[in-house]
Image (cartoon, grey):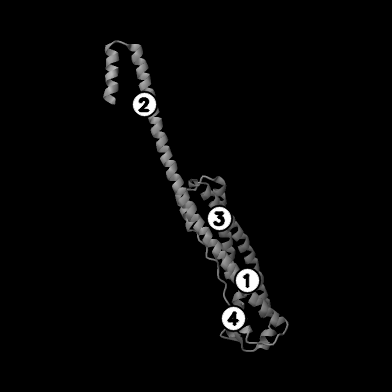
Amino acid sequence: MIKFFRKIRQQLLTENKLSKYLLYAIGEIVLVVIGILIALSINNWNEWRKDRIMEREVLGQLSESLTKNCEALEETIKAVKELNSSRAIITSAIVDKTPYSDSLEYHFFVASLDFRNTTLSYSGYEIFKNEGFSVLTSAKLRVAIVNLFESELKHFETNESEAIRDVYIEEVAKYMIHNFSNRRIPNDYASVQSNQSFLENLKAISEREDWLNGQRSRLLEKCRRVLQFIKEELEEE
């Protein structure tokens, strides 16, 4: 093809057809420019395609992390409700001076359990950060994801960590270790019923965990909303 164009140029110059040569030269330049533009378009399309593939992979990883977080929050909320239900039964038994029965053993044991924090996943978000926030085309989704992982989840984890060191659960655990057999059968039930400090500590633990469960519920809804945004984004592509 190059030899063909060269032959045409030489023929025009030989025949001294300068005007035709100039037109030909301009046409040749136009063809070259068009070829470059086509090559750039193909290259840009390939890069766009690679970016979209990476975007889907990142969205998939984020979706997986958020799904795990939703499940973890749901499990913790359910577990805390069960724990507080047992604490409520113990509290009522103490306040109402209910006679001791074997059915209270389980609830006394639950009342002595240490607090456990929610295990949250950040793996998808770390991949998102490593690839660069611009990998997501939706600015609204980028903001929602960054705010959720950098602010909401970390703020909640801080509150949970502080709750783990709560003095009330420590006091309840110490009392039951020294005054209960296997942390479930009171050595002197009448003494337990008359111990106002033990009662107040149980109430304080329940109030604190109810408050944390409120935070978990709100965080769960936020995780679900962002997860839904991600699913909608994946469906559009």
Describe the element under mark 4 as helix, strand or loop. helix
Describe the element under mark 3 as helix, strand or loop. helix
Decide: marks 4, 1 in contact (CB < 8 A)? Answer: no
Describe the element under mark 1 as helix, strand or loop. helix
Q: What residue type is labelled 4?
A: Phe
Name the residue rendered at 29%, 13% in the picture.
Answer: 13
Q: Sequence-wise, which precedes: disc 1 or disc 2?
A: 2
Name the foreground residue: 43 vs 194.
43
Distance CA(mark 4)–CA(mark 2): 83 Å
Q: Name the residue under label 1.
A: 81
User: Does residue 175 lie above or below 122 as drawn?
Assistant: below
Distance CA(mark 3)–CA(mark 4): 37 Å
Name the foreground residue: 38 vs 226.
38
Q: Sequence-wise, which precedes: disc 3 or disc 1?
A: 1
Name the residue rendered at 59%, 78% in the picture.
Answer: 110
Q: Position of residue 12 (x, y in %)?
A: 30, 14
Q: Which of the 4 image quadrants contains residue 94?
A: bottom right
Q: Sequence-wise, which precedes: disc 2 or disc 3?
A: 2
Callout 3 crowding tier (Cα within 10 Å): few <14, some 14–19, many ≥20: many
Q: Mark 2 points at which residue?
A: 32
Callout 4 crowding tier (Cα within 10 Å): few <14, some 14–19, many ≥20: many
Q: Name the residue under label 3.
A: 227
Q: In this view, does 174 lie to the left or right of 96?
A: left
Q: Where is residue 160 in the image (x, y as percent from the top left)?
A: 58, 66
Mark whose residue sits in front, 3 or 4: 3
Distance CA(mark 2)–CA(mark 3): 48 Å
Distance CA(mark 4)–CA(mark 1): 15 Å
User: Does residue 201 lie above or below 30 as drawn?
Assistant: below
Q: Where is residue 220 in the image (x, y as percent from the top left)?
A: 59, 60
Name the foreground residue: 80 vs 23.
23
Q: Mark 4 points at which residue?
A: 109
Q: What residue type is labelled 3?
A: Leu
